[in-house]
Amino acid sequence: MNYYIVICAHNEELYLAETLRAVLAQSLQPKKVLVVNDNSTDNTESIIDEYVSGNKPILKVNRSSSAIHMPGAKVVEAFNDGYSALDDQYDFIVKLDADIILPENYFEKISELINSDPKAGILGGFAYEQNTDGAWKLNHPMNKDHVRGAFKCYTKQCFKAIGGLKNSIGWDTVDELLARYNGFKVITDDSLKIKHLRPLGASYNKKARFLQGEAMYRMRYGYLISFIASLKIAWKRKKWVLFFDTLKGYVQAKKSNLPYLVTEKEGEFIRNLRWRNILNKLF
């Protein structure tokens, strides 16, 4: 299968080379790898330039943006800049962070999963992060049927059906909800163990937590589902301030009457799906 990778990199000199080496070591090679240098002020661009040579499938796009890290909007804008520089001749597209080490068979396995299920839409493995003892431990705060935004693969049919990635924090939740709405499956494989070099949420700040609540509003969760989701986030990360900040973001978004990310019909599907998942876990 042909696949393209878009890597978004902002000041990733510590990790980017390892990510690119892992990509080039894949048993099923990518047709193109587009690295977006997103306003980096360190040696990120020099590292990219070292790999953009010879017969390597690696390309570079430079992008100017704010230096402030804000989960959601910034990374999706960078991804979209990279995606727009690619053609349409792929079977699946990959959104990859620049601090990821993939197993060598990662995309070969993804290809097999796609070929084995015509409803495959979004696919991926699971993230492992290094603890203080140096051991790599599973770190997956969401459901096991969720693929982390740091290493998502989309079949072309699914990516087109959901309209690409939404420019908002929560994009890596709404994409899966819309994939299911359009009849696609989210497929995970626990044999695909990915090393995530930067701890989850290390760059999140208070404003980002408000935006997470805003995303719940814009996905048409409704207050009660947002309340439960906020509790879950706080409990999983053992930080109760997350509960209050997330709910505050939801309330502020509602007061501001912000535009929704999904249609009313999609929102109804999302709420029903969320309630089914909640009830299945309770009973």
Image: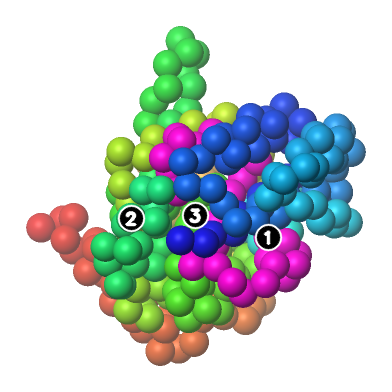
Q: Which residues are magenta?
A: 79-107
Callout 1 amino acid: Phe
Which amino acid, mark 2?
Glu
Q: Residues within 10 Å of mark 3 (few under 14, many from 20)?
A: some
Figure check: 275 above or below 50: below
Residue underneath mark 3:
152
Considering only vertical position in the picture, is 240 above or below 283? above
Q: Is residue 266 at all visible to an observer of this figure?
A: yes
The tag earlier along the polypeptide, 3 or 1, is 1
Placement of the C terminus among the 4 image quadrants:
bottom left
- Mark 3 is on which residue type? Lys
Q: Please, what secondary structure does the residue beneath circle 1 have?
A: helix
Element at label 3: strand
Circle 2 — which element? Answer: helix
Residue that carries the numbered disc 1 in the rendered image: 79
The answer for how far apart the CA atoms under marks 3 and 1 are is: 12 Å
Q: List x then y, in percent, for residue 83.
A: 68, 66
Q: Residue at position x 40%, y 73% from top?
A: 179
Q: Residue furthest top?
A: 133
Label 2: which residue?
A: 112
* Residue 19 is inside the magenta segment: no
